[in-house]
Image (cartoon, coloured by chain):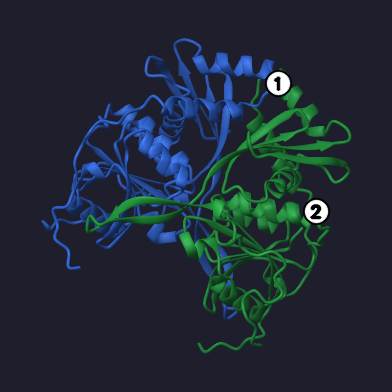
Chain colours: A blue, B green
Amino acid sequence: MKSKKPHDGIILGPNLGDKSLVSTISGQDQYGKVSNFNVIEERPLSIFLNSQEIVTAMTIGDYPEYLALGFLKNQNLLKSDDLITSIDYDPDIKVVVVRTQKETNYEQKLKRKIRTSGCAVGTVFGDMMESVEEIKLPYSEVRTSWLYTLSREINQMKSLYLEVGAIHGTVLCQEDNALVYMEDVGRHNAVDKVAGWMFSNKSSPENKILYTTGRLTSEMVVKCANMGIPVLVSRSGFTAWGVELAKLTDMTLIGRLKGNRFTCLSGEKRLIYDVTLDQ
Amino acid sequence: MKSKKPHDGIILGPNLGDKSLVSTISGQDQYGKVSNFNVIEERPLSIFLNSQEIVTAMTIGDYPEYLALGFLKNQNLLKSDDLITSIDYDPDIKVVVVRTQKETNYEQKLKRKIRTSGCAVGTVFGDMMESVEEIKLPYSEVRTSWLYTLSREINQMKSLYLEVGAIHGTVLCQEDNALVYMEDVGRHNAVDKVAGWMFSNKSSPENKILYTTGRLTSEMVVKCANMGIPVLVSRSGFTAWGVELAKLTDMTLIGRLKGNRFTCLSGEKRLIYDVTLDQ
């Protein structure tokens, strides 16, 4: 494996410089000793699509525009032909408003749904699942050497997780390079911020690998599929439905990546074993 | 510390006998070797309050009645004077319906909210926060010896987590005894199932300790406060808002409990240091 340092080639890394993301709180330890502890922030952020309030997310508070955009895209509430005219964030009232040129299909659906007495959450869920059934992710290669390099570098990279803990990370990768590393209290927010970044920067998904510190649940797989990324990797484990949805969309799903060990439960055809391991 | 075994005194433990909670999936490992892996199930469950659909939760699928009841109670959608007439679970359509004698305050609010074009999620969030501001949890004692015993026993207790991973646990405890241990893919579901059990069994919260494997976020603290339990303990870390809400409700909040170490960031007054540790 070639020798390179974590952070080499990274475009957007963990937000260590932003002191507003961490609070210092006085407490006591197992000896009864009083000291200060650093704790990650968590704030509500309400996301609006035009005049419609969609959700209140709990977030550390960085990149609210990426979070809102990525959330709406990943939940399939914004279609690719919806033209976004503005994204406005108001830090005082903790609201971000994504505006489109025309009323979206979702807003129409929501109105209809409300008239029939159902709840918006059900609509969101239904829309998300509906969209995933149509997705077939393109073929790509995944070398096992990339997985090992990414795992090592991401674990060593300076992050809010290493500083204060209680936070998840999602990393957009290409081959063995980490490109964009987002963190948040909710693993879903971290992946939505990556999606918002990709959409804003017109980043193509076909040759990417998405790494998450969180578990490979149905929701993570659906978000990754909606982003068009064919490979989802985690240090954590799987749920059965996550695996099922990965198979349905032709996604390569790799979990329990630690050191040189991993488990692949879907899309094994993309794997290229280019590192010989001692058995 | 007295010597007792994990499972001593437990009323309801992890659901190891239920084979429907685990799937066996073929995959391959880091050597390219094909084998079978056990993976936790994850299924949608739609929760209705009378004729109103409230949420679709992703759950492993055990104790749907406790989950629905606990969710509605913890979100403050059911008040203490709402008389529950039935809880019906239909496994075919994966729906659980909680019925009350009269239409609830929440259903009225939801109708009003819909008329003013907002989304149900916002209502749920607002209601949850509104309720917590009125809560002042009663005084109780927490001996550090209890914390160490609980931590050791819960970590050793047979569980789906130890069998297949990718799952969170919540344990209702009294002194150094684990009473009810619920697991789920979402840490919120596990705590809601405990809440449903407590409500169904008229278990008093004042002398209880709630242990969670998940992080101490605002939502976990709010749920614990709504359950009336004055002490919340985790092996994981904190968020700043979680700590703030714990202080607001006079809750003892203990995180990073591992071996004989812990950090207490709220409600230190309940702690009794009855174990002398080597420094």
Look at discs 2 and 1 and give the one toward the viewer: 2
Amino acid carrying label 2: it is Ser
Residue name at image x 51 percent, y 56 percent? B167
Q: Secondary structure at mark 2?
A: helix
Whether residue B179 is situated above or below residue B185 in the rendered picture:
below
Considering depth in this image, is B102 or A279 the residue closer to the camera? Answer: A279
Whether residue B148 is situated above or below residue B74 in the rendered picture:
below
Other-residue count near label 1 (Cα within 10 Å), few / some / many at <14 / 14–19 / ≥20: some
Residue name at image x 17 percent, y 52 percent? A273
Whether residue A161 is situated above or below residue B124 in the rendered picture:
below
Q: Which mark is residue A127?
A: none
The answer to whether one can see residue A6 in this image is no
Q: Is residue B137 left or right of residue B169?
A: right
| Residue identified by numbered label 1 | A117
Q: Residue A128 at x, y = what percent? A: 48, 29
| Residue identified by numbered label 2 | B200
Other-residue count near label 2 (Cα within 10 Å), few / some / many at <14 / 14–19 / ≥20: few
The CA distance from mark 2 to mark 1 is 29 Å
Q: Chain of mark 2?
A: B
Q: Is residue A48 left or right of residue B190?
A: left
Q: Chain of mark 1?
A: A
